[in-house]
Amino acid sequence: MAEKKHLLTTRQMAEFACDGFLRFDEVVPPELNALAMKQIEDKSFPRGGGYTGEPFDNIWHEWAFGTIFRLPAVQGIIHSLVGPNPRYDHHAVHVVGPQSHIGQIWHADAIIDTRFEHFDVQLFYYPHDTPREMGGTMFLPGSQFRRVNESDVARYHNFTGQMPVVCKAGTILVGHHNLWHCAQPNGTDQTRYMVKLRLNPTVRQVRLWNTDDINAPDITNLLGKSHGWYGSEHRIESVQRVKFWRSLTGNDVFDMALWVGRIENEPQTVLVGR
Ligand SMILES: O=C(O)CCC(=O)C(=O)O
Ligand SMILES: [Fe+2]
């Protein structure tokens, strides 16, 4: 069970609703990164699969990765987004070899997943320093509500506002399951590793974080932030975010500038006798 002091704040949840991810730099200590690298490089840690459908709490106790994804700070992140006792979906050790000059196509991992109120998280863990020339993963902030069938977006090469993860060892990014992303080319002589873990919720995702700041006045501003690549379609995202926020908070009347209230406005009062 995560301790309250490690849970996300409402402001962080609003950032997640807006961007589709949160980033935690150097949250994993160096000795665990070193052990993780050893278990990746000697291939003792499985490159993927194995426990689909099992409670995450039951698995990986023999690996550095079990300790890493159960660090109090990481547990707090997981609990805030998918709750206690998440289910293991899958994981993968993603490898980009030295001098690999072709990047991945833009994609979302969540083919056939049309859920909205319920969502999975993917944790992207970078066990070694990842400078830009090594690639990292490119993410598109705010893409999580644009549902695509995996590689529908592969024709695009670059987006305004795309964000390459350039980070120090021990950085974790937690993303919504439908966030668009792609591995980048690696122009260095070292192999680039990233470990991705997908977790499913086992409870309703309502107010699982530290809600002490739920009435903070800047929440609406945080939720309303635009991303350059939307253009005038920003209003589509405003509607999605209001609906998502209603679901997360359980507040069915939350709104921003009547974006959803306007659509819901179907008055039933009939004026008679005039
Ligand atoms: O290697 C990466 O940075 C991303 C890989 C990935 O997302 C995938 O293969 O689905
Ligand atoms: Fe992917």
Image (cartoon, rainbow, N blue to C red):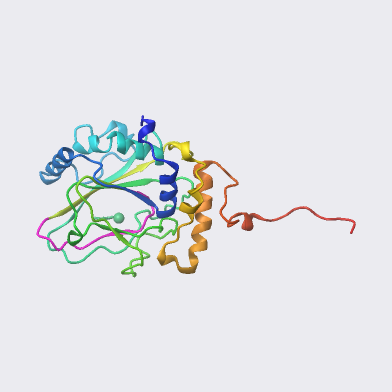
Image side of residue 213 versus residue 34, left or right: right
| Whole-percent x, y for residue 137 in the image | 26, 57
Residue, x 34% and y 69% (percent of image)?
A: 156
Q: In the picture, residue 178 is in which quadrant? A: bottom left
Query: Which sits in the foreground, 91 or 219?
Result: 219
Viewer can see residue 204 = no
Q: Which residue lies most toward the front here?
A: 217
Relative to 229, say whether 45 is above or below. above
Main SS of residues in magenta: loop
Query: Which sits in the foreground, 137 or 150?
Result: 137
| Whole-percent x, y for residue 124 in the image | 28, 48
Relative to 258, say whether 120 is above or below. above
- Looking at the rendered image, the quarter that the C terminus falls into is bottom right
| Whole-percent x, y for residue 9 in the image | 42, 41
Q: In the picture, residue 108 is in which quadrant? A: bottom left
Count of numbered circles on the image: 0
Viewer can see residue 108 = yes
Image side of residue 210 versus residue 131, left or right: right
- Looking at the rendered image, the quarter that the N terminus falls into is top left
Residue, x 17% and y 62% (percent of image)?
A: 133
| Whole-percent x, y for residue 148 in the image | 41, 60
Q: In this picture, which residue range is highlighted in magenta?
A: 174-190
Query: Which sits in the foreground, 133 or 243?
Result: 133
Q: Is residue 180 magenta?
A: yes
